[in-house]
Image (cartoon, rainbow, N blue to C red):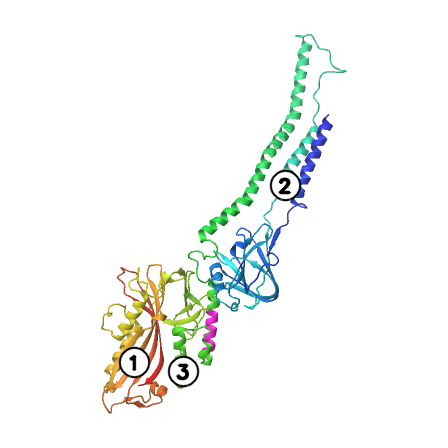
Amino acid sequence: MRVKTAVPIIIAGVLLMLIGIGQRTFWAPPETVTFSVPAGAEAGPVTVIDAEARNDDAGDVDITVKSGGPFTLAVGRAADVDAWVGDAAHLRVTGVGDEELTTKFTEGEATVPDPRGADLWTSEETAEGSVTHHWINPAEGDFSILLVSDGTAAAPSDIAITEPNDASTPLAVPLIVAGALLAVLGIALLFISPRSTGSGRGRPTPAPEGSRAYLRQQRAAADRGVRARRRVHPVAVAAAALLAGTAVAGPAAAQQTVKQQTVPQQTVKQETKAAEGGSGNAKPGAPAVLEPQLERILESVATTVAEADAAADSKLLQPRAGGAALELRTAGYAVRAKDKKASAAAPVAGSPVLTRVIPTAGEWPRTVVALTQGEGNPVPQALVLTQDNPRTNYKLVSAIQMLPGTTFPASAADGALQELAPDAEEGLAMAPQTAVAAIADFLTSPKGKHKGTFEANSFADAITGFQAGVVADRDNAAATISFRHVAQAPSTRALGTEDGGAVVFGYLKHTYSSVPKGRGDSIDLNGTIYETLTGREKTEKGIDVNYGEAVMMYVPPAGSKDKIRVIGAAQQLLAAKLK
């Protein structure tokens, strides 16, 4: 009977163990799973792979793209990619279905520009035939992928996404454990001695009750019972208890494993969407550009400006310069072409970056600021870069040297700050554009209404000191001299600081006008740079000399007793014209 009972139990245990081991080995599901775009999906000049196509909890995700020709794969913030796509026709990979990727096609414009080299991307690569991209988000927030062939031909649509397989075998371990315990129980049963029934040959004859022989027989029977209990109970009871525990814990463990692998993924994804504002929106507070992006942009700008400076060719500047920076450097090239002794503008250094001010991602135009100081710069310079729209690159619109003894506002350094409208005055001691107009008015009339608006600074002292010296010069007694500084509103940029103030960048046009007072009087230009520029030694009608002046100021928050501080400036002679 012992063998008939133990052997089936042992066999059942071994079978359970084999089934459990099989689930962990040759019956185990594949480590990865691949989903593809359905065959025949309609394509356009752009293909976008949405952030939702990448499971937030799926570790390594690979995207394989195949195409009949060359194409560009670019990664960017989801909202930025959507802004670049704009009204173009495009195929969008929206997510992962049960067996394949889900897609949506949107009608629109049939062509797009070449996306290569765009500052909007955090990374990009060009391939021909096929490429496998390891998809890792470079920062917090939603990122998507853009695919473009040549802007006219259909973008690649043969796309496959491979990610870790979240299928599991939750019963494998419980089966192995239960099988092992059953096998142990069966083996234990084989070694259990049968309890004597007291029947058959050799059974002693009962002694008379109460006799000494009877008492010895009772004591011997009791000893045999104790030994039997000591042999049987520990193994049998322990095995039974463990088996019972496994029977209860096995399904519970399996349920818990399944729950951990299915429920939290969906919950986390929903919470992430809620926190980040849903698909296609940059995470609130996310910077407009990441640090590696900014370094790449600065390197490109510095290289372009250096090449243009070396050739004194303003056309070379145009891909990476605009606004005041383009005007000042172009004028500088023209002046030096006529007067080799004229001073050149300070070189633009892309590194090292001392401080960066990056606004939060939002609408366009976007402005970022980097404070750098290269070997050729005696003082740090603030490089103001502006991106007009998603499909254009950042351009240097101002390169301003820090004034001696000034510091860049600490509350503006290394933060994702809000870009302010030029006319924004709420919370500020003065609206940015008003502050630029005020410095222009102060330089024109130092004793006017803005006499006490600004802290003393070397830039204003130099300008007003020069003007007062020219007027007081006796050689100019026969001339009527005037100075006028005018703010150029389109060039004003402002970034809010953490203390409620703002860093304001402005551009002024300065006109120095000299006109003879009476008939026969003249303005002597001999030996001056104005003679070089005009080709005349004197003029009886007068002359206008034009300068460009870039300024950087700190405007304190409303209610502050501090004055506006001019912390940087750059001036360049633009032209000299005879009246």
510, 68: nearer the viewer: 68
Q: In this view, does 153 lie to the left or right of 511?
A: right
Dot 3 alpha-carbon crowd within 10 angstroms: few under 14, some 14 to 19, many 20 or more: some
> Counting residues from the N terminus, which is met first, the one under dot 3 or under dot 2?
2
Q: Give the range drawn in magenta.
A: 298-308
Q: Quick check: 260 above or below 280? A: above
Question: Dot 3 corresponds to which residue?
Answer: 334
For the stretch drawn in magenta, the main secondary structure is helix
Q: Is residue 61 left or right of residue 326?
A: right
The reply to whether discs 3 and 2 touch (Cβ–Cβ < 8 Å) is: no
| SS under mark 3 | helix
| SS under mark 1 | strand
Which quadrant is home to the N terminus? top right
Question: Dot 2 corresponds to which residue?
Answer: 172
**Which dot marks residue 512?**
1
Identify the amino acid type marked 1. Tyr
Identify the amino acid type marked 2. Ala
Q: Distance between the residues labelled 1 and 3?
A: 19 Å
Q: Is-magenta flag for residue 91?
A: no
Q: Distance between the residues labelled 1 and 2?
A: 89 Å
